[in-house]
Image (cartoon, rainbow, N blue to C red):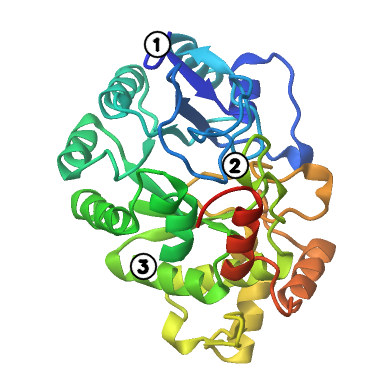
Amino acid sequence: MSSPELVRVSTASDLVLFQKVWRFLGNAVPMTINLLLHFPDGCKGNCLYCGQARESPPAPPDRDLIRVPWPLRRLDDVIEGLKRVSRSGTSFRPWRVCIASVTHYRAVEVLKEVVKRVRRELPVPITALVTPTLFREEDFRELYRLGVERIGIAIDCANPTVFDLLRGRRARGPHRWERYLEGVEEAIEVFGGGRVGIHIIVGLGESERDCVELMQRIHDMGGETHLFAFYPEPYSVMSEWPRVNPGQYRRVQLARYLIDAEIARAEEMRFNEWGQVVDFGVPRHVLEEVIDSGLPFVTSGCPGCNRPWANERPLDGVPMNFPWVPRGEELEIVKKQLCAYESPPRARIEALISYLGSRGIRV
């Protein structure tokens, strides 16, 4: 069986929906139920950092995605679970359901069917995470008519060369940088400003400047950016690529907040020879106030999305994406990380090309 009858459910969502007893570190209960389409013949994309890639080594059906297993569940059971927790009287109320597609010839029709079934039973807001390789403007319009509130598009790679190396032609994959940006424009045209978000995975070989310039471009279109810290996945080509440097991630987080809050613009920021941010383009007292708020370092996503521990382990130290506002000692560690610069950065395009060559990938 496959979707729409079956869907994969993130570990945290599965605990909330189907387990009688659960506890989350720091009481960081997930506020979004995350679902993923499932097809027995898998995803037809070949993104080299993903354990679901078409040419990835054999792996169990519930193999990790963004660091955690996604068990298979019947969609009808997921809907019943949502109903149950919504009326349970506990403090937990899911803010939304995020339904993620995969690159598969049936994905467009099946995603629409899953949206229909969820909307028929529940008034909860829905985000659809889609690929513009398959979804076109007419599909965005139909998703809007079906009741989808927001669209997510995982560009992932902030640099067109990195995109081509890891997702496009040179990765033997179907995705194209230009089509992804066109898809973002189409989705914003249909859903309106502030209702379309892109994903960037920081640490794939791009520079901080690449991230900043893409985030500004998306903001000027009317979109927003949701950040993920690269964490190597088993069964992927990138399984031995280094985790993102904390300083790099913190500076991109801070720049994202300043751009999306319209406190600063990319062209006002300054960068060193490695493309690292050395000046955020705002007065010192403004920057300190923003940092002291802790808000730039909270998980970025749709309203209510906190995806606790989605791409890191709770015991690794302070999280890259806080499911709460960091204060005290946590914030002091973040401030130190902001000021830490690798010179030269380990994760850059030249190193990426060399790494892929060592794994037998012709680039």
Pointers 1 and 2 in contact (C-beta within 8 Å): no
Judging from the image, what secondary structure is the residue with disc 1 in?
loop
Residue 351 in view, yes or no = yes
Count of labels shown?
A: 3
Q: Which tag, 1 or 3, sits closer to the chain's start? A: 1
Location of residue 312 in the rendering, given as x and y in whole percent from the top left corner: 71, 46
Residue type beneath disc 1: Glu
Look at mark 2 in the image and give the residue it sits on.
Answer: 307
**Hey, which quadrant is residue 254 in on the image?**
bottom right
Residue that mark 3 sits on: 219
| Residue depth check, mark 1 versus mark 3: number of the one nearer the observer | 1
Name the residue located 19 percent from the left edge and 55 percent from the top edge. 189
Residue for point 69% across, 56% down:
320
Mark 3 neighbour density, 10 Å: few (under 14) some (14–19) many (20 or more): many
> Which one is nearer the viewer's eye here, 348 or 285?
348
> Which residue extends farthest bottom?
283
Quarter of the figure with the N terminus: top left
Foreground pick, 160 / 219 = 160
Question: How far apart in space, not on screen, are marks 3 and 2 (Cα)?
Answer: 22 Å
Q: In this view, does 132 lie above or below 294?
A: above
> Looking at the rendered structure, which numbered label has been put on residue 5?
1
